[in-house]
Image (cartoon, grey):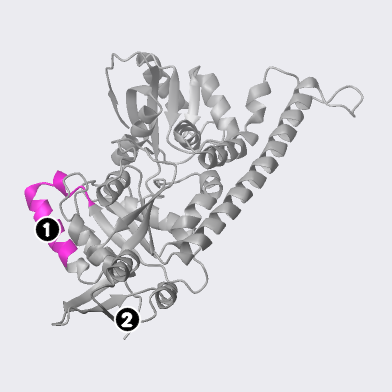
């Protein structure tokens, strides 16, 4: 068991963060898991006074930890003068209740912590609906904790419940009714999203989705690629609500790019299900950019966690999923490591598998644009000839396709080779029927 006490002067809720180290169930370093859990706690504005890794050889059904370890941790909690304890694991309602009794502080597990953060960060109506649904699903099994002060035994007649049971059943029914209403509202959101996707398909722009472990730098990269000012901060789950913008690729090809919620190890199943409407955008994308914090010592394990979530997202029938890894934060690497990473990325870039960038400094961004264009630019080529007076048609082609060749002859005519989506080609034939060779 390793631990450290931390001194803070900020008057927030004082907390201790505990990571139960099972080792056999995760390739990630316990120290990295502890640091991540502490980061989650700070994202919830908790004042982390102590952090501790506890080796867990076996679990105790009543308290997760053995009785001796519970007492040892109680001493640490008192020494830190903590008001709350974050246990970086999923606790059963019974374990959570028993630990609160033993430690005499509020106990929150990993799922509860993430749900609370999501609840604070969601801004759009869709995001708030998704988080509320996930929270209710989580709380439904924990209602017994709210009514421990009431009698839960059967009444004397054997047919009516005691006051505690009545309240619990009432609350469960209210939650069940609310869940039904939320699912209906989210189904409407999903239907609306589907209509929007159909409308976008009529505008033949390929779609790109940014995914990655939380705090990998997706929003910073999104801002760099689009010139937008989406909220980006060195903070876990800084982005929850999907944002979409149009970007220009080399030779003027437009594409729609979406910034999405960050993934995390052991992402609560309630959230995966609740955010299904949002994650469908990822499944529908023509290209997925998997943004990795290549400077993190846990980068490989984080990548596996992201891949595990991606496997849960369905892809439309007949659609091939294309993924390009974006190795971000190269500016944070030591010189020798950086050289090796850039060399490896350069080799993988030739195969369309990875590009190394720094979204913060802008290094590698143009190479990333080229790589994106190469992976999504599979529309057929069309040869066209424009007369000198057809400047409007030329502008339309740059707006709706990718010009791969352009030459002007002695008569002032412009000869072009343009990659055009079949739908765009159909519109071109209607708008400018005399341009196609």
Q: Does residue 37 sit above or below 402 in this rendering?
A: above
Left or right of 136? Residue 91 is left
Q: Quadrant of residue 326?
A: bottom left
Of marks 2 and 1, which one's residue comes earlier in the chain? Answer: 1
Question: How many tags in the picture?
Answer: 2
Q: Quadrant of residue 234?
A: top left
The residue under the point 39% across, 40% down is: 239
Which numbered marker is on residue 340? 1
The residue under the point 35% across, 37% down is: 236
> What residue does disc 2 label?
382
Neighbours of disc 2 within 10 Å: few (<14), some (14-19), many (20+): some
Which numbered marker is on residue 191? none
Neighbours of disc 1 within 10 Å: few (<14), some (14-19), many (20+): few
Q: Nearer the viewer, residue 384 or 127?
A: 384
> For the N terminus, which image quadrant?
top left
Q: Which residues are magenta?
A: 328-346
Say whether residue 428 is visible: yes
> What x and y, as percent, mark residue 414?
21, 77
Left or right of 389? Residue 283 is right
Q: Is residue 360 magenta?
A: no
Examine the residues drawn in magenta and state their main secondary structure.
Answer: helix
Say whether residue 209 is visible: no
Q: Does residue 337 sit above or below 128 in this rendering?
A: below
> What x and y, as percent, mark residue 270?
55, 44
Q: Secondary structure at mark 2?
A: strand
Q: Are marks 2 and 1 in contact (CB under 8 Å)?
A: no
> What x and y, as percent, mark residue 181?
68, 41
Q: Nearer the viewer, mark 2 or mark 1?
A: 2
Q: Does residue 24 sit above or below 412 in this rendering?
A: above
Q: Secondary structure at mark 1?
A: helix
Label 2, label 1: how far apart the Cα atoms are: 41 Å
């Amino acid at each position: 068991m390793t631990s450290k006490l931390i001194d803070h002067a900020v008057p927030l809720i004082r907390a201790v963060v505990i990571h139960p180290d099972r080792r056999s169930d995760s390739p990630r370093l316990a120290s990295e898991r502890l640091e991540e859990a502490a980061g989650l706690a700070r994202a919830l504005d908790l004042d982390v006074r102590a952090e501790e890794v506890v080796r867990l050889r076996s679990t105790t059904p009543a308290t997760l930890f053995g009785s001796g370890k519970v007492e040892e941790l109680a001493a640490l909690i008192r020494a830190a003068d903590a008001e709350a304890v974050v246990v970086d694991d999923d606790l059963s309602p019974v374990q959570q209740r028993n630990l609160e009794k033993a430690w005499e502080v509020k106990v929150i597990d990993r799922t509860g912590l993430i749900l609370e953060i999501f609840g604070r960060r969601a801004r759009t109506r869709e995001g708030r609906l998704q988080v509320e649904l996930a929270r209710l699903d989580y709380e439904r099994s924990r209602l017994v904790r709210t009514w421990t002060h009431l009698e839960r035994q059967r009444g004397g007649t054997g047919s009516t419940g005691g006051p505690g049971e009545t309240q619990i059943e009432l609350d469960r029914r209210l939650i069940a009714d609310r869940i039904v209403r939320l699912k209906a509202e989210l189904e409407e959101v999903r239907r609306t999203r589907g209509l929007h996707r159909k409308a976008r398909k009529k505008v033949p722009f390929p779609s790109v989705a940014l995914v990655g472990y939380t705090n990998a730098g997706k929003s910073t990269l999104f801002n760099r690629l689009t010139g937008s000012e989406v909220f980006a901060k060195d903070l876990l789950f800084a982005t929850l609500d999907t944002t979409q913008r149009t970007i220009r690729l080399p030779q003027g090809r437009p594409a729609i790019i979406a910034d999405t919620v960050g993934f995390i190890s052991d992402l609560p199943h309630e959230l995966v299900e609740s955010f299904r409407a949002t994650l469908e955008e990822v499944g529908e994308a023509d290209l997925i950019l998997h943004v990795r914090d290549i400077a993190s010592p846990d980068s490989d394990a984080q990548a596996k966690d992201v891949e595990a979530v991606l496997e849960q997202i369905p892809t439309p029938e007949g659609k091939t999923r294309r993924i390009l890894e974006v190795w971000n934060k190269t500016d944070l690497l030591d010189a020798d490591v950086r050289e090796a990473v850039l060399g490896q990325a350069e080799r993988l870039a030739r195969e369309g598998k990875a590009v190394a960038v720094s979204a913060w400094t802008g290094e590698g961004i143009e190479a990333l644009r080229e790589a994106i264009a190469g992976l999504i630019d599979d529309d057929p080529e069309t040869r066209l000839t424009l007369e000198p007076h057809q400047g409007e048609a030329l502008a339309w082609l740059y707006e709706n396709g990718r010009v791969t060749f352009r030459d002007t002859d002695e008569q002032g005519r412009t000869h072009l080779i343009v990659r055009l989506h079949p739908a765009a080609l159909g519109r071109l034939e209607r708008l400018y029927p005399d341009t196609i060779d």
